[in-house]
């Protein structure tokens, strides 16, 4: 009896050790081969969501007399999914608060995305006025499958070589969803390189984006991203269409992120680690 029990116990211990070794080997192999793309995906998703929130405010502001430029006394809706637009006053006495209220059921917008909840933007002056500051926040806001938190500060830095320049800073950014929990902050310069002369036309606007972001991916691993060749935010496309950056992930080799290889309007980027190239899909 004792001998049989001893053999069985040794066999069970053997199985446990073997299973543990296989699990550890798999995890070790993933780290050793250095093929992790989670940080590249999560960082790209954060860029996309916070850039998109700024675009929503930009489009509304540029079509309203009080906030931006367009010579009209009726605010226009650049997205059909916007349920209601509210400005806190009808005269240009700043600060003014813009409330963009999306349908609670998440209707599909003109650009194919779903948006829920509220984006609020407080304007210290008109959007196109040099030295103006706009603070963007969220109230129950959701884009597609992702809940969004954080604060975006937009500063108009005036003109450089006849091109408007903005500083856009994201603080306390957080994106959560199914198996996704990203913390993200960044400070970037947006240079308005095309479309600034045609204020009332908002879909010909093109911005070049430079700057640095930091965050933690959905497994809590820290990363830093520095744009080395300007990202291109073409407002006729919902994704960045050009640009390169270097992504540093804790305990891993640097990744080199490239939007230029696709040069198309899609949610795919390329992450290179040494001579290994991996396609990364931004979820939505």
Image (cartoon, rainbow, N blue to C red):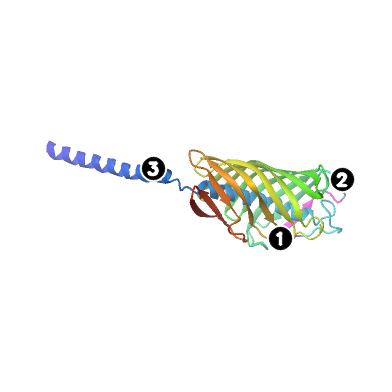
Q: Which residue is mark 1?
A: 79
Q: Secondary structure at mark 1?
A: loop
Q: Earlier in the sequence, mark 1 or mark 3?
A: 3
Closer to the camera in the image, 274 or 241: 274
Q: Earlier in the sequence, mark 2 or mark 3?
A: 3
Q: Which residue is mark 3?
A: 28
Q: Secondary structure at mark 2?
A: loop
- Residue 100 visible in the displayed image: no
In percent of width and height, residue 264 lies at 62, 61
In percent of width and height, residue 19 lies at 30, 44
Give the number of the disc on residue 220: none
Q: Residue at x 58, y 45 (%)?
A: 246
- Tell me: 225 left or right of 160: left
- Tell me: 236 left or right of 216: right
Part of the protein shown in magenta: 77-90
Q: Which residue is mark 2?
A: 93
Rendered view: 272 above or below 201: above
How crowded pointer 1 is (Cα within 10 Å; few <14, some 14-19, many 20+) is rated as some
Closer to the camera in the image, 141 or 164: 164
- Residue 156 visible in the displayed image: yes
Q: Quadrant of the C terminus?
A: bottom right
Q: Residue at x 63, y 62 (%)?
A: 112
């Amino acid at each position: 009896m004792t001998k049989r029990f001893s053999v069985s116990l040794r066999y069970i211990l053997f199985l446990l050790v073997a299973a543990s070794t296989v699990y550890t080997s798999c995890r070790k192999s993933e780290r050793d081969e250095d093929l992790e793309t989670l940080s590249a995906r999560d960082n790209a998703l954060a860029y996309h969501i916070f850039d998109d929130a700024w675009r929503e405010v930009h489009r509304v502001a540029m079509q309203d007399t009080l906030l931006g430029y367009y010579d009209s006394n009726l605010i226009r809706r650049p997205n059909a999914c916007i349920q209601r637009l509210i400005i806190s006053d009808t005269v240009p006495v700043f600060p003014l608060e813009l409330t963009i209220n999306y349908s609670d059921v998440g209707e599909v917008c003109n650009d194919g995305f779903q948006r829920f909840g509220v984006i609020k933007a407080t304007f210290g002056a008109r959007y196109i006025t040099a030295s103006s500051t706009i603070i963007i926040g969220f109230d129950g806001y959701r884009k597609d499958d992702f809940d969004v938190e954080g604060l975006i500060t937009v500063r108009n830095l005036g003109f450089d070589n006849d091109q408007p320049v903005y500083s856009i800073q994201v603080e306390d950014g957080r994106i959560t969803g199914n198996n996704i929990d990203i913390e993200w902050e960044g400070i970037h310069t947006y240079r308005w390189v095309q479309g600034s002369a045609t204020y009332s036309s908002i879909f010909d606007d093109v911005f070049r984006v430079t700057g640095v972001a930091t965050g933690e991916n959905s497994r809590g691993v820290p990363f830093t991203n520095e744009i080395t060749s300007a990202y291109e935010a073409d407002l006729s496309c919902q994704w960045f269409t050009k640009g390169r950056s270097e992504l540093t992930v804790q305990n891993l080799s640097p990744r080199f992120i490239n939007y230029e290889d696709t040069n198309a309007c899609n949610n795919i980027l390329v992450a290179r680690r040494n001579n290994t190239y991996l396609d990364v899909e931004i979820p939505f």
